[in-house]
Structure formats: structure tokens, C-alpha cells
Image (tube, grey):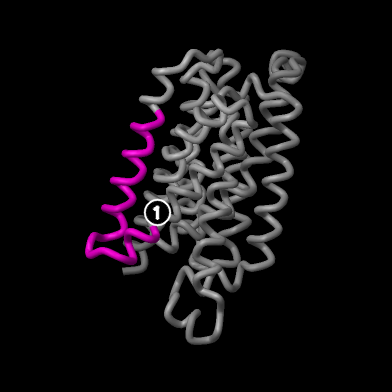
């Protein structure tokens, strides 16, 4: 029995998948808390879809794909901010237009080139095929994002709750705004090889939403989000081996189930106190 349970750990590709999942759980969970509080969930979706043309252009220029992905993500974030500030159109509408336009542009570019990189691996990731380079890249990015978020957690929290008050007390609101967008772009780059463009948005929304339902203290949201993502990620990768499914969608499915449980629990507690 024990031998069967430990069987997945005998394969190097499974161990790499476990390590990758634990690495990307940290930055995605931390940023997820701020995105949920700030109402920026769609921003993460926009940037994740917008990196596709950057990946294709980077392939054409024969440069690292992560460079193209990051540049495209930043272009999307900056364009969204500029258009939202200089038009009457609401930010969510602008984000929908920008990310769908860039995603469509990326698909058109991809269909016009001959490449060994399968589109499914870009869109949905290939966690079982991550290399040592992917692990090191994700580790460095995850460490940098985590350090910045933890160092500026109070400033980012005030900016998320009340940007007007943050500006009144002298915080560099614009730097915090675009700094957070940069961290989102970097984190999506870190998750690109593992969960792909589409599923990365699940890791940037679900952990913060679950933590928000579990606790009302922001200081507890961060560790709860990281813990939930790490455990769900580990279980998702582990379970995918036995049910013969892709790890990334399985992880997202487990996070969705955890969210449903947290939602039902929160509603039951609210009814009990009324």
C-alpha cells in the first residue's frame, strides 16, 4: 500500500512538477490577496492573455520567451492604465478590449509561423516537462516577487484598500500601482512553463478569494493563501498521476472545490450569527 502511494515520487518529472508547484504557489498566492482586495482580478486575466504575442515575437527574434512575455505583459498593463485614465471608458471595459485584442494578435502571429513549440504548452503549460532552467527561472522570480511584496505589504495594503488615503499620507501611489502590475507580469512569466497562459489566472484569483472567505484579518490572508495553494497544488499534481490527467487543470479544479467549501462555510457562519 505504502509503495503504491509513494510510486509517483520515483519519477524525476513528477518531482520537478512538485517543486515547480511549490515555487509558483508563493508569488501567485501573495499577489492574489491584493488583486482580490483591489478588485483587479480581471487585470491578472488581461495580462496573462496578453503575453501570447510577446512569446511568439520572442521566438521569432530567437530570444528567451520570458523576455517577450514580460514585455508584452507590461505593454498591456501600461496601455490599460493609460486608456483608463484618459477616457470615459471604465477600466474593466478597457482591460477586456486590450487583452482580447492582444490575445487575438498572438493567435494570428502563431498561425503564421512554423514552430516546434506546441500552442497547448503555451496556453495550458507543461508541468511534467519543466526543465532545471525553468525551475531556476521560476525560483528566482518567485523569490524576488515574494521579497518585494513582503517588504511593501503595508503600503500595498493601504493602496489596495484606499488609494486616496495612501496618496494623502505621502505614499508613491503611481509607483505602487505600476510596481504591482510589474510584479503580476513577472509572476505570470514564472508560471508560463508550468500552467500556461490561461490557467495562470486561476492561481492569481482563487487563493486570495479563499483566504478572504476564511479570515477577516489581512495579516492572516497572506499565509492562508500560500498554504492553501501549496497544499492544493501538491494534491493536484499527485492526484493527476493516478487519474491520468494534466496537473495544472487538476490543481485549478481542487482550488475551485476549496473555494466552494470556503464559500458554503462562510455563508453558514453568517446565517448562524444573524
Membership of 84 in magenta stretch:
yes
Which residue: 56% across, 33% down? 192
Percent x, y of residue 222: 59, 58
The magenta span reads 81-106
In this picture, is 57 found above or below 28? above
The residue pinned by badge 1 equals 79
Residue 10 appears in the rendering: yes
Q: Secondary structure at mark 1?
A: helix
Which residue: 58% across, 53% down? 183
Q: Nearer the viewer, residue 196 or 90?
A: 90
Percent x, y of residue 190: 62, 39
Q: Nearer the viewer, residue 256 or 262?
A: 256
Q: Residue furthest front?
A: 61
Q: Nearer the viewer, residue 115 or 246?
A: 115
- Could you tell me what secondary structure mostly forms the magenta stretch? helix
Please state, as top left, top right, bottom left or bottom right, where the N terminus lies in the image. top right
Amino acid at each position: 500500500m505504502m509503495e503504491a502511494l509513494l510510486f509517483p515520487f520515483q519519477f524525476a518529472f513528477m518531482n520537478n512538477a512538485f517543486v515547480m508547484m511549490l515555487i509558483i504557489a508563493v508569488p501567485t498566492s501573495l499577489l492574489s490577496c491584493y488583486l482580490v482586495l483591489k478588485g483587479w482580478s480581471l487585470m491578472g486575466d488581461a495580462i496573462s492573455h496578453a503575453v501570447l504575442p510577446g512569446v511568439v515575437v520572442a521566438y521569432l527574434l530567437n530570444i528567451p520567451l520570458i523576455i517577450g512575455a514580460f514585455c508584452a505583459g507590461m505593454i498591456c498593463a501600461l496601455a490599460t492604465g493609460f486608456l483608463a485614465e484618459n477616457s470615459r471608458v471604465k477600466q474593466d471595459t478597457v482591460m477586456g478590449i486590450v487583452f482580447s485584442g492582444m490575445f487575438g494578435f498572438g493567435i494570428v502571429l502563431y498561425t503564421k509561423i512554423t514552430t516546434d513549440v506546441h500552442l497547448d504548452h503555451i496556453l495550458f503549460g507543461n508541468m511534467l516537462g519543466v526543465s532545471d532552467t525553468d525551475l531556476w527561472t521560476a525560483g528566482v522570480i518567485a523569490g524576488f516577487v515574494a521579497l518585494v511584496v513582503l517588504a511593501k505589504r503595508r503600503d500595498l495594503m493601504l493602496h489596495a484598500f484606499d488609494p486616496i488615503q495612501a496618496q494623502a499620507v505621502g505614499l508613491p501611489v503611481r509607483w505602487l500601482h505600476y510596481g504591482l502590475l510589474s510584479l503580476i507580469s513577472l509572476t505570470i512569466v514564472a508560471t508560463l512553463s508550468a500552467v500556461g497562459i490561461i490557467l495562470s489566472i486561476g492561481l492569481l484569483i482563487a487563493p486570495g478569494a479563499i483566504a478572504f472567505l476564511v479570515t477577516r484579518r489581512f495579516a492572516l490572508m497572506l499565509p492562508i493563501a500560500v498554504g492553501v495553494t501549496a497544499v492544493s497544488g501538491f494534491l493536484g499534481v499527485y492526484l493527476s498521476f493516478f487519474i491520468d490527467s494534466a496537473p495544472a487543470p487538476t490543481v485549478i479544479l481542487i482550488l475551485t472545490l476549496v473555494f466552494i467549501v470556503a464559500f458554503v462555510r462562510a455563508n453558514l457562519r453568517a446565517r448562524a450569527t444573524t
